[in-house]
Structure formats: structure tokens, C-alpha cells
Amino acid sequence: MELSESVQKGLQSLADPMLFDLKTFSVLIEVAFQSLVSAHADSSVLDQPEFKRIDQMLLKHCHNAATTCILEGVKQNADKSTISSCLEDLRFDAERTDVFYSIYQKYRSDLETLLSSIGRCPPHINDVSWRLEYRIKNGHVHKVNEPSYLISLNVENANNGGSSEDLHFSCTMEQLQVHNDLVGKMKDAAKSLEKATQL
């Protein structure tokens, strides 16, 4: 997992037993996960009795680093070996790594659900209809004499619960050729992918 320098420094502070004993570390990791999955998370999540003796700036920095690491791990679908090697590189001992991973496993499915609900999916094309229109004159009574295509796409939008809608647009012959070239490239890519998966 690639983490920024600031996140790495925060995690290194979190790994330091002089700054965070094991109990305080465990509470902070649990609070970090809870703040991500809770719909009502606010700054009061850091008002735990275990955190009273810790500098508030350091505490917030470490909390931010932990949540960033957690989200990055869930986003990349990181397994135990990936998380362990990342944390060990940041000077976590085996006990802290085990604590982190056990809490990670506890909240992983909730965080995967949360992250998948945030993503934006492009609409899926269900149907296409078109018609050729030949314009003889424009609105200013000038001769145009050019064909254009009226295209209607029926798309299903996964972000709106699978509702379908129609998208309409008009294009000239040249614009349609550009779209046709794009479709050809997409077909070539699909064939290449199909060949690669058969190997």
C-alpha cells in the first residue's frame, strides 16, 4: 500500500510504545474504524479517557493516519500479509499488527459496503435507436442540405437504483464517424481482452 509521508509519520507515531501504550493504541484503532462506519461521527470520538494524556494535535494526526491506512487497505482489498508488511515497515511490532488486523477484519465488510456505495458507475446502455434526418434549411432560411442523425440511448443507471432513462442527441455524419471509430476501438479492446483470458 502506498501511503503519503504524513500518513506514514502518523502511523510511526502510533507504533511508538512511548507515545501510545497497547491499550491506548487498541482504543484509537477501534475509534478510527468506528468513526468511518458511523453515520454520526464527530470530533467527540476522540474524547476517550485513554486519550487525556496525549497531545491533541498528535492524537488527531494519528487518527487521520489510521483512517487513511484503513481506507486504503479496504480499497485495495488488502490481505493479512499486505497489511502486516506495510505496518511492519512502519515499525509496528507483531502485537500491534495483530490488534490492527483483528479490528480490520471486524469492520471490513461494513467498510467495503460503504466504499462501494460511494463509487460512481457509468450508465449501462440497454438499447439504441436512431433515425436519419435531412435538413434542407435552418432557422434563418438558409439552405443547409445536410444529413444528421438523431440518436436515442436507453440507459440503466446503477446509481439511481437501476432506473432507466433515455438520452437523446443529434450528430452530423462526421461526428457519427468519430463515434463509430470509438466503437471499433472498444470492440478491438474487448477482443484483445477475450484472447488474453483464454491463454
Image (cartoon, helix red, strand yellow):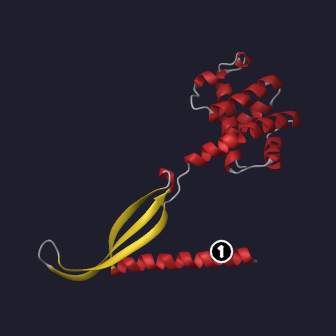
Please count the marks in the image: 1
- Residue 97 rendering spot, x and y as whole percentages: 83, 37
Would you say 49 lies left or right of 18 here? left
Residue 122 vs residue 89, the one in the foreground: 122
Relative vertical location of residue 147 with respect to residue 129 in this rendering, above or below: below
Judge whether 48 appears above or below 119 on screen: above
Q: Is residue 151 visible?
A: yes
Quadrant of the frame with the C terminus: bottom right
| Residue 153 image position (x, y, % from top left) | 41, 67
Identified by mark 1, the residue type is Leu
- Between residue 192 and residue 14, name the one nearer to us: 192
Tell me which corner region of the image, top left, top right, bottom left or bottom right, holds residue 93.
top right
| Residue 27, position as x, y percentages in the image | 75, 25
Q: Report which residue position mark 1 lands on.
A: 193
Point 69% across, 79% down: residue: 195
Name the spot of residue 73 as percent of width and height, x first.
Answer: 71, 46
- Left or right: 131 in relation to 198: left
Q: Residue at x 60, y 48 (%)?
A: 116
Which residue, as the protein is rendered here, is positioned at the far right?
94
Give the answer, above or below, for where 185 lies relative to 58: below
Q: For the view shown, which residue lies furthest in the bottom direction?
A: 145
Secondary element at image label 1: helix
Is 135 on the left or on the right of 95, as rendered? left
Q: Residue furthest left?
A: 141
Quarter of the image where one finds residue 152? bottom left
